[in-house]
Image (cartoon, helix red, strand yellow):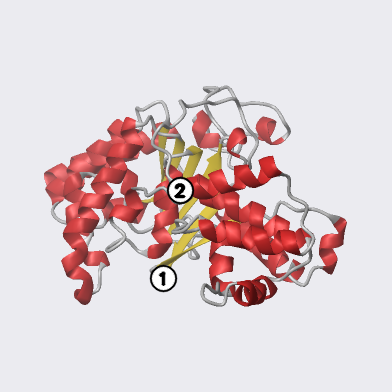
Amino acid sequence: MWNYLCGHISVCRKFQEGGHCAMSENARAFDGNAIPFRRPERADATWGIAATLLGMRLRALREEVDMTQRKVSDLIARSSPRAPMSSSKISRIEIGDRRLHNPEDVAVILDVLEAHGLKLSKPERKGLMETARNAAVEGLSDTYRDVAPEWMHRLIELTSRAESLFSLETSVVPGLLQTDDYTEAITPSTLPKRLLGHAPRLIELRALRRKRYMQAGPPESLYLIKYSALEDLVGTPKVMAEQVRQLLKYDEHPNINVRVVPRGASGMQRASSMTRLVFFEHDGLPDIIYNEDQGRGKYWTLPQDKDKDKAKDPKAKQEKEEASEYHELQDLYQEAMVQALGREDTRKYLSELLRWWEAV
């Protein structure tokens, strides 16, 4: 595990070589190596996990019969001219970043694939349709879809099911750690004038996200926060003092680690807000990196298929580029990790900053 989780200044070489640092066993390294950590199962699961798993499986089945999304779309149009399905819609279903509005769309896709050579057992088809129904279950993001950016919906739903969460914020305090007053002060400043009327609903959504995050028992979480996000005034000095005080309290939680990236740290220009989610093994999901830059977010996963024939796939180049981007973002986070203050130095910095904001 990395240094500041252990309270040191340099990276823990023993962990990189396959060993363990002297720390709580309830932790997970950013590179995917794990020390056992479990949380209770979530009873309020929504579409996030199911939609992602469904999309991964549908794509694999389509590629199994060597068909493109365009080809599937054309065949659906021929068999059901009154209910066509665009290739972009099929792509969205396979990406799994949105709630599935009609589970029967999956049945239509499976019908076409089976009619053109796919061998699918009845139990597997039944399981896929059950996953499709789960992928249609509304979540918190759907209640606020009128104000929440579309690219945020998936993050909102998946966070509640993650085993571990790694966050890097360079401009503001992480949303899940903000106080109510800080959220009320910062939200309007992040919106263009034409959307200022959305601020009250966005503030309400962010408060509910924090409540769900804490009430469920947060995943093992590591937050890296650039110093300027804590020293730049948001609202009033009183708001800032209360926010810093709250960060000190959060850092006392056994599952939450707060670390400050100090002045002089380099290499963080590419991300203003980045989150990596690691899921329970039984969920079957790859790690997901969400990166927000210039006001828009995008998701990255590491391609799982390592078949040697993959090099002949026309999409191999795109997947190679995505894998490269994924690793670059991972390296960016790890670089921030190495430069971040250790736990004691972070708490000392926050305590001094608290006194400063109280005195302003």
Residue at the image point whose x is 46% and y is 46% from the top: 158
Circle 1 or circle 2, nearest the eye: 2
Residue at the image point whose x is 69% and y is 36% from the top: 16
Q: Is residue 168 left or right of residue 203?
A: right
Query: What's the CA distance linking mark 1 and mark 2?
Result: 27 Å
Residue at the image point whose x is 26% and y is 57% from the top: 232
Task: Kindly state the secondary structure of the residue where label 1 is placed.
Answer: loop
Residue 189, quarter of the rendered image: bottom left
Residue 35, quarter of the rendered image: top right
Task: Kindly state the secondary structure of the residue where label 2 is placed.
Answer: helix
Report the front residue among 133 and 280: 133
Answer whether residue 233 is visible to the viewer in this image. no
In the rendered image, residue 91, in percent from the top left (x then y), is placed at 58, 67
Q: Earlier in the sequence, mark 1 or mark 2?
A: 2
Q: Is residue 242 left or right of residue 249?
A: left
Say how many tags the image has: 2
Q: Amino acid at mark 2?
A: Trp
Report the front residue among 106 and 208: 106
Residue to which mark 2 is pinned: 47
Q: Is residue 105 above or below residue 262?
A: below
**Neighbours of disc 2 within 10 Å: few (<14), some (14-19), many (20+):** many
Residue to which mark 1 is pinned: 294
**Neighbours of disc 1 within 10 Å: few (<14), some (14-19), many (20+):** few
Image quarter in which the N terminus is found: top right
Report the front residue among 321 and 141: 141
Report the front residue among 213 and 262: 213
Q: Is residue 199 above or below residue 130?
A: below
Q: Amino acid at mark 1?
A: Gln
Q: Residue furthest right?
A: 308
